[in-house]
Amino acid sequence: MTPPSRPAPGTARETARTLMDGMENDAAGSGFELESSQRQAAERLAAFGAQIAGRRRTFSRKAPRSIYLHGPVGRGKTWLMDSFHARLGLRTRRVHFHDFFRKLHAGTRGLDAVNGTAIQHSIDALLADTDVLFFDEFHVHDVGDGMFISRLLRTAAQQRVPLVVTSNYAPDDLLPNPLWHDHFLPTIEAIKEMMDIVEINGSWDFRRFPADGSTSGTGFEAFGSGRIISPGTPGQLGRLGLFRPPPSQRRVLSPTTQPIVVKNSDPDLLWVSFEELCGGLTSASDFLALADAYTTWVIDDVPSPSITDSASAPAWQRFSNVVDVLHDQDIRLFLIGQGPLDWDIGAAGNILPVDLARIASRLALLGRSSVDDSPAREEAAGS
């Protein structure tokens, strides 16, 4: 496979053209053309890349304005950012929202967290020797997370490290909870002051309608090769190479501090129930640690999203975090439940996750197996 081209030394216009051509070639290789808002965002990224390259050549301390890409789910924000990131060829670091907080907390161990030194030390380490920080799935729903984000932005500005951010939220819509939104307004104003706000607002969700009718080109081929299986008969599972583990294979894992009883943890394959994974006190750090160890996950006994009560709200939010992590880490996922396993429903009250649309879009990448599918149809759909 030919490695992506790097922008050659030259004028800012030449560098921007090379980067733009690279992103267009990546799109063509994935079977589509950049639509209007994607093209505008790509042009802004290419100009930004030329500024960064020029800054490196001239040893300038002046940083270009950061970029905040936002828009509805599945419009290609992460794809575009990753295409640009792969072709920039400078000192970069890419973090996902959940991974950012894992790195942040990992860097605080053994340090003085009381006076804020630990958090600052961890943020400094994240930004060290970095020309650009790429931050995917930027969102704020918790006031505590908002404080950490505020410090990151402030430190990045002080150290002249520009950011490229993707988000499903316009800046004004961050931390939407009316009880806390006003506390985040200074940070929202700082975002608008230091970043160019670029909306990607195409008319359809590319995850649901990929160019070639498959997940090819999404960048998440392993995740997209998983399936949603209902009701999970032995025949359905067997045709997919899945066999329910016997009770003798159960074991306890402790990915961070929270023990989890799993039904099977063979090399590369984790099999766990929805209740055990999401019904307790697990966190995104647990899911990230498990994603490092297992490339295929099977979550069974998944309840129907249409049958919920207020007591299940924390479990569904953890499930949302699981899907986020597995999608970002490109982990193959099988979901098994009686059904109906349909996330394209309204999020009533505070029961289902506030980011339900994003989770539904991610899960739309998975194939489906139902009891009505013939063996030939299931095999043709792939496993």
Image: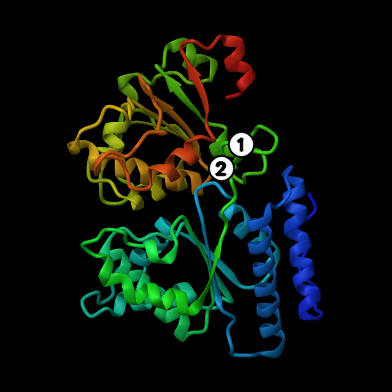
Q: Residue at x 57, y 73 (%)?
A: 132
Front-lying residue, 149 or 331? 149
In terms of secondary structure, where does tag 2 sit?
Answer: loop
Residue 48 in view: yes
Residue 108 in view: no
| Residue 302 image position (x, y, % from top left) | 34, 28
Looking at the image, residue 309 lies above or below residue 229? below
Front-lying residue, 37 or 364? 37
Name the residue carrying label 1: 209
Q: Amino acid at mark 2?
A: Asp
| Residue 190 image position (x, y, % from top left) | 41, 78
2 and 1 marks in contact (CB < 8 Å): yes
In terms of secondary structure, where does tag 1 sit?
Answer: loop
Task: Give the quadrant of residue 170.
Answer: bottom left
Looking at the image, residue 311 lies above or below residue 340? below
Q: Amino acid at mark 1?
A: Phe
Q: Residue at x 53, y 20 (%)?
A: 241
Name the residue carrying label 2: 205
Front-lying residue, 306 or 336? 306
Q: Residue at x 61, y 17 (%)?
A: 379
Q: Is residue 53 left or right of residue 125?
A: right
Q: In the rendered picture of this protein, how many numbered marks are placed on residues? A: 2
Q: Residue at x 65, y 78 (%)?
A: 52
Looking at the image, residue 245 lies above or below residue 177? above
Q: Is residue 361 left or right of residue 98?
A: right
